[in-house]
Amino acid sequence: GGRVWVIGLDGASFALIEPWVRAGELPAFARLMSEGAHGTLRSPVPQSPPAWASFMTGCNPGKHGIYDWVQPRPGSYEVDLACGAMRRAPTVWRILSERGRTVGVVNVPMTYPPEPVNGFLIAGFDTPYGNTEFTYPRDLYPVLQDRFGPYIVLPVIVDVPLRQTVQNYLDTIEQREQVMRFLLEWYDPQFFMLVFNATDSLQHLCLQSYGDNGRNADQIEALRLVYRRLDHFLAGLLERLPEDTTLVVMSDHGAGPLRGYVHLDHWLAQQGWLRYASDSPALAARRWRARLVGKAVALLRAAVPASVKARLRSGVGGVRTRLERAATPPLLDWAHTQAYTFSSQGIYINLKGRQPQGTVEPEEYEALRERIIEALLELRDPDDGQPVVSRVYRKEELFAGPYLDVAPDLYVHWREDAYLSWSNMARSRSEIFTRPRTLEMDDVVPDESSGARVGCHRQEGILLFYGEKVRRGATVEGAQIVDVAPTVLALMGEPVPAEMDGRVLEEAIDEGYLEAAPVRRVVGGGEGARDEGMGYSDEESELVKERLRELGYL
């Protein structure tokens, strides 16, 4: 038996935590590190959708099917936004529910629409704006609204000064802590999980460098405030942690400064592997209309007070994205394109027999992948002359499973994870690199915050265990994101489905407990995968796109 509470701190990094622990700023983290077990948690694909999906299923993306923020439709050049409905492997809380254990899940990304569980579930920030059906059971939402006011899935981030964005996140942490206390007392689940997004979102906007070097002292101070608030939250958890309960604190990836954006589509075009649709008079007219639409919507936004925007955001966003979609021409000349990208690190081959207008013969596939890999490894940052790419993986080197076919054919690992791939048609197509723009604390966060990002993800997240079953003072080496779910099951005395790719992190668990409750693997123990065809409606998709633009992901 036994209970497990998991606290997810999206994007949290030991690069920030450890210096503040040494300075005495984070006493709860210090206690977790000295009295529990801890180590780095590695995410081979440090993007939120595949990382969270791998965490909750214990499976690599080849088995759960989620690779990025957007997913290609098989046999099409169209893409869909990733959401929990696309996940093709069961979550740890679904497995526990099927076995009769009680569960509670709050704001884990990639959980919309909410799935039925033996307990309660509040979906994450992939919930569309304005949607009130993001809880299971459905009647939980009005209970929360009556008690705590409007439930904040994600606070107002954009169209307000950065200083206000930080305060909005602090307010969200406060509400989520109150909701957690209420739900734990009401339901008393055996498995409980809660995620805070503040760390990730604010690191994107503030983490220009790790240290307070004068260049971004105010921004680092804002991050310190948020980590201190979360440390205070963890201290409260430690005080009320029931007996026979293990506390797990983790992040889906780490964080670090962003060196720049690499426009992979522009690079592919320069190399001759991608061709944009020709600038015919008709297409030029449509581009002109698209620019007018963009200016009109910008004026509309500027005229609306921020307080009203917070309430009306879904309406304005939906209008804009529908207008843009109607006015945007076809981007690529598929008949003359061999490789293309729409994701943050992936490149797709335009393969005959797989893509609708494939140009690459199957027998040319490997040779083309090799040429692209060689060329990427030669790509250099003009600022320091160093290579931008540390390695390029063929998809079968990273992933395995029944959903390998929807994976990018090539997967780029940037040097030090310090670059982002960005397809931006508004920029000159001769431009391969662009640099992030720093926001001061009183600057207004732009509506599409991608241009104001100074921080990005790293593969190295955090993992900490605390409780009676934990090996005190142990260091956990080589932990992967897929290892957390099987370890949670083992700590609850449950067998681990053989289908899970992850291992039980026995080095974190007390030897006496392992002897009394040895790890068991069972075939077919992973019931409860999602049904096919449960993704967003067109309207929901537009609302979620608006949210992801504000976070800087689209």
Image (cartoon, rainbow, N blue to C red):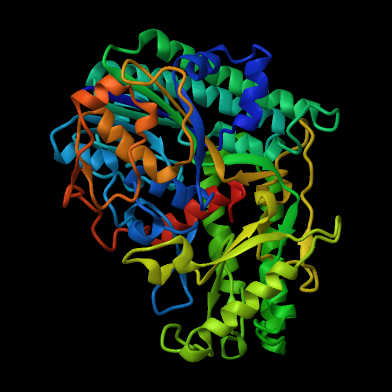
Which of these two is toward me, 277 or 146? Answer: 277
Report x, y in % for residue 363.
48, 90
| Picture mark count | 0
Report x, y in % for residue 183.
30, 21
| Residue that protrudes farthest toward the top in the picture | 239
Q: Residue at x 72, y 86 (%)?
A: 279
Name the side, left or right, on which 35 lies relative to 20: left
| Residue that protrudes farthest toward the left in the picture | 100
Q: Residue at x 40, y 8 (%)?
A: 239
Q: Is residue 60 visible?
A: yes
Q: Residue at x 61, y 23 (%)?
A: 226
Report x, y in % for residue 358.
50, 88
Name the side, left or right, on which 77 lies relative to 116: right
The quarter of the picture where residue 261 lies is bottom right
Q: Quadrant of the C terminus?
A: bottom right
Against 35, residue 51 (above or below) is: below
Name the side, left or right, on which 502 lies relative to 429: left
Against 418, residue 36 (above or below) is: above
Q: Quadrant of the N terminus?
A: top left
Name the side, left or right, on which 407 lies relative to 246: right
The quarter of the picture where residue 304 lies is top right
Which of these two is toward me, 157 or 525? Answer: 525
Report x, y in % for residue 294.
68, 62
Q: Is residue 158 visible?
A: no
